[in-house]
Image: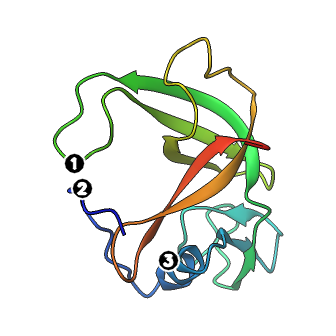
Amino acid sequence: MPDDYKGPVPVPTPETQDFWDGAKRGELRLQRCDACKNVIFPPRPFCPACASRSVSSFTASGRGKLYSYVINHRPPPGFGPDPHAIAIVELDEGPRMMTNIVDCEQTPEALLLDMPVEVAFTPVSDDISLPKFRPAGG
């Protein structure tokens, strides 16, 4: 667990507990609507596409592509190295999630839109690991 992490630590709710339990095990967990098959992120007790309350969790591939990003050159204390990328990754399963890009130079030359990425988990407490993404195969 990193001693230098001073950022907020997520507090699981009944709707997000499976996601955080999976992250602790090194799995990216998503939900799928049992009625319309829409893949859902962030976790919630209903499908935003059809309003069905029948949703199931599954382990995602952990792969996607860099959809968008901004390089933060002045983060608040504890929010990562200076500079660091705040990114949106489009998962292979469809949803997009906000995250950070790690194990890569934090420059426009290195952070190429549509580049393949894969999930990497950073433990921040005994119970919480944050999903971040790195260039695929890296």
How far apart marks 3 and 1 lie (CA) works out to 21 Å
Where residue 37 appears, as percent x and y from the top left, is: 83, 69
**Mark 1 Cα-neighbour bin, 10 Å: few <14, some 14–19, many ≥20:** few
**In this figure, which residue is indicated by the disc labeled 2?**
4
**Image position of 32 with respect to 136: above or below:** below
In the picture, the disc for residue 20 is: 3
Residue type pointed to by label 2: Asp
Residue 131 seen in render: yes
Residue type pointed to by label 1: Gly
Whether the residues at callouts 2 and 3 have beta carbons within 8 Å, the answer is no
Residue type pointed to by label 3: Trp
Where residue 128 appears, as percent x and y from the top left, is: 41, 75
How far apart marks 2 and 3 lie (CA) works out to 21 Å
Q: Is residue 83 left or right of residue 50?
A: left
Give the number of the mark in front: 2 or 1. 2
Q: Quadrant of the C terminus?
A: top right
Looking at the image, which residue sits at the far left? 77
**Image position of 121 with respect to 67: above or below:** below
Residues 47 and 24: in front is: 24
Residues 94 and 73: in front is: 73
Q: Circle 1 — which element?
A: loop
- Residue at (33% x, 62% y) in the render: 2
Figure coloring: rainbow
**In this figure, which residue is indicated by the disc labeled 1?**
78
Residues 10 and 34: in front is: 10
Whether the residues at callouts 2 and 1 have beta carbons within 8 Å, the answer is yes
Residue 45 seen in render: no
**Mark 2 Cα-neighbour bin, 10 Å: few <14, some 14–19, many ≥20:** few
Where residue 49 appears, as percent x and y from the top left, is: 68, 61
Whether the residues at callouts 3 and 1 have beta carbons within 8 Å, the answer is no
- Residue at (22% x, 48% y) in the render: 78
- Residue at (52% x, 27% y) in the render: 69
